Amino acid sequence: MPILWLSDVDKNDIPVVGGKAANLGELLRIEIPVPEGFVVDARTFKDFINRANLKDKIYSILQNLNVENTEELNRVSEEIRRMISKAKMPEDVEKEIRRAYKELGNGKDVYVAVRSSATAEDLPDASFAGQQDTYLNVKGEEEVVNKVKECWGSLFTPRAIYYRVQKGFRHEDVSIAIVVQKMVNSEKSGVMFTSHPVTGEKVCIIEAVFGLGEAIVGGLVTPDTYVYDRLKKKLVEVKIAEKKFMIVRKNGNDKVELGERGKERVLSDLEIKRLVDLGEIIEEHYGKPQDVEWAIEGGEVYIVQSRPVTTIKTKEEKIEVEETGKILLKGLGASPGIAVGEVRIVQSEKDISKVKEGDILVAVMTTPDMVPAMKRSAAIVTDEGGMTCHAAIVSRELGVPAVVGTKNATDVLKDGMVVTVDGEKGIVYLGRLEVSKKEEAKATPISAPIITATEVKVNISLPDAAEKVARETNADGVGLFRIEHMVLSLDKHPMKFIKDGEIDKYVELIYNEMKKVLKAFYPKPVWIRTIDAPTDEFRAMEGGEDEPVEANPMLGFRGIRRDLAEEMHLRAEMRAIKRLIDEGYTNVGIMLPLIVSPEEIRRAKSVAIEEGIPLEKIDFGIMVETPAAALIIEDLIKEGIDFISLGTNDLTQYTLAVDRNNENVAYLYDETHPAVMKLIERTIKICKEHGVKTSICGQAGSYPHVVEKLVEMGIDSVSANPDMVHKIREVVARAERRIILEKLRNLR
Ligand code: PEP
Ligand code: MG
């Protein structure tokens, strides 16, 4: 019997109906108002692939798959999903689904949600939440049957396959049940944590929007927030957000502008009380704080889903070196982690083949040519550089420990020497040291994503790492895509392509790389920065011999000034971006570096327009990374920009006259120097007055103490290094809550 009604299932049925359906059944049993529905159980899927002769095919393809090879992963995923969608659903199963759907609507066609619920028979506690597809607003027997099949296929999305391999699940052990549930046509909806998701305190946190809840889940609308203290039995925080639109169900999901109504409070005290009461019953039933989705239709509150907030306090492993070894070198801990391996000194790109898997790559400074070897290495150590040098940025993106700016690693370390590198503390020890694993209590909510009003984005420079970064950070977009790393790793100098009459080839090359990032993050925004590399970095490329030799490249021919002087290069970038927009990647944004005058924006804009970029469709903005830009920001805004992003790396070096790559003056380099902070504060304030979005993509956006201040100043988004996104999200959430609390206290 493939169909089970929700009201007939409970937690004992998890192996066959999955956690989601079992939970809903449990809730119905304790008389929580849950929309009715049925489940196509997990055995039905197994039976389907057996009867369609797909079982052996699917699992043998998966057996040979290397999930780290993204292209292969995508190809295999597509192939399996195609096989499933082409295969015919067994007639008896289809008949049963049609019958149950009719019964659910009392003979009428009703709107339903078709949700996947993956399940591992022998591992009832395994969590696959959010891995598979859900379809909303499905109507009609035919559509329901189709969507059930699509949900089956979603057991093999690249993300789901990757996740199972990472977690050590055998694909064969996992199956999928499908929940078909009546949709509430919500006037209001949202989410609720029955207790605080991080501290576990007995405060109920509710987020609410008008219309359907997809607006919250997709992060499209900032919801109202209500905090109800369950011990004091009173509402302690109300934050009314401006909700620009709501999503309603018409033919599909439609956006409706809310205008003035968007400023109104969504929930009445009575509705909040009803939600809290239901939340308390659910929490008590499960004996654990819950993360609940709810909806209100015709004044009735419905609970659509409930899952535990699993880790109020979890243990995290902290790796530490037992500090008994001889310290060989000290530098800046640029990418956390500890590694032991044999030293390989790399003088130039010619040496990179000597770096084998697990070696320690040591160089004066890394270059884009060295990236393949950086990927193989267990750790990276350099003589030069600060927190924003090539080695630091790339190693963080690759997740490889790194120590930079040691001054003389290439002298002190010798090929073949065994060393231990501590990328957190910035120390290189002689020999293989004991590494102790300490368990540290750490508060991290797992099922509950931290939702912040300030967006938390990520910086990217390696297109090949984009998909992994997107998956692991779940960032709200890319606040800085530094394209120079990918350009510098091409065979020849960009202007040489152009001089050789190969501009189309160059456009094609950068378009392909850009696309990887846009695709990985789609539909989240990706701000592509036009090229910004100093002349000394271009010189090593074929055709780079003509690069001017500059006494101080940091103050030289770089950023937008270079792209305007070599206008064909700017045009090439715009052509690549235009192709992406034409393909529907309107999540792209353009960001101009090192702006010092309105003229530069004006000229770059006209090139963009001449190349056919529809500026009305995408974000167009600038970096504020010179004191000049911060001081004349009003004039820059007049040129028509959608956003600014604070480049604190350059802003600090230019304000304090401290070369950011010069270790001799590194002790003076301080992003929180009052002069830098004043420029930042002024920029944010004036941009806010003019409705220009503000962001930060300099290294300071990864520093909790700076980010706290920026949130107080009202910054709209923060773009952090990949390794810091989760931490920064916590910092932002805490800062936002503190601000709300302080405001409330002042009101009393
Ligand atoms: C900055 O200057 O802060 C910045 C983000 O740009 P880059 O580090 O690439 O110069
Ligand atoms: Mg910069």
Image: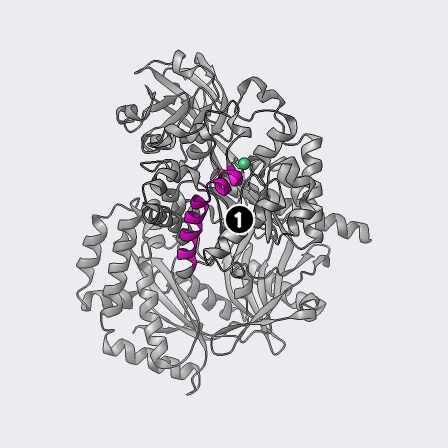
Residue 127 in view here: no
Q: Main secondary structure of the magenta part?
A: helix
Neighbour tally class for label 1: few under 14, some 14-19, many 20 plus, Cα within 10 Å: many
Foreground residue among 122 and 465: 465
Q: Secondary structure at mark 1?
A: helix
Vertical position of residue 266 compared to residue 724: above or below: below
Q: Which residues are the magenta region? A: 559-581
Q: Which residue appears at 23% of the width and 74% of the height?
A: 90
Residue 635 in view here: yes
Foreground residue among 511 and 710: 511
Q: How is the image coloured?
A: one colour
Would you say residue 90 sits in the magenta stretch? no
- Locate the N terminus and report the quarter of the image it occupies: bottom left
Image coordinates for residue 598, horizontal then vertical, percent: 62, 46
Foreground residue among 458 and 579: 579
Would you say residue 576 sits in the magenta stretch? yes
| Residue at image mark 1 | 604
Quadrant of res 53? bottom left
Vertical position of residue 57 compared to residue 299: above or below: above
- Horizontally, is 140 left or right of 206 in the view? left
> Amino acid under label 1?
Ala
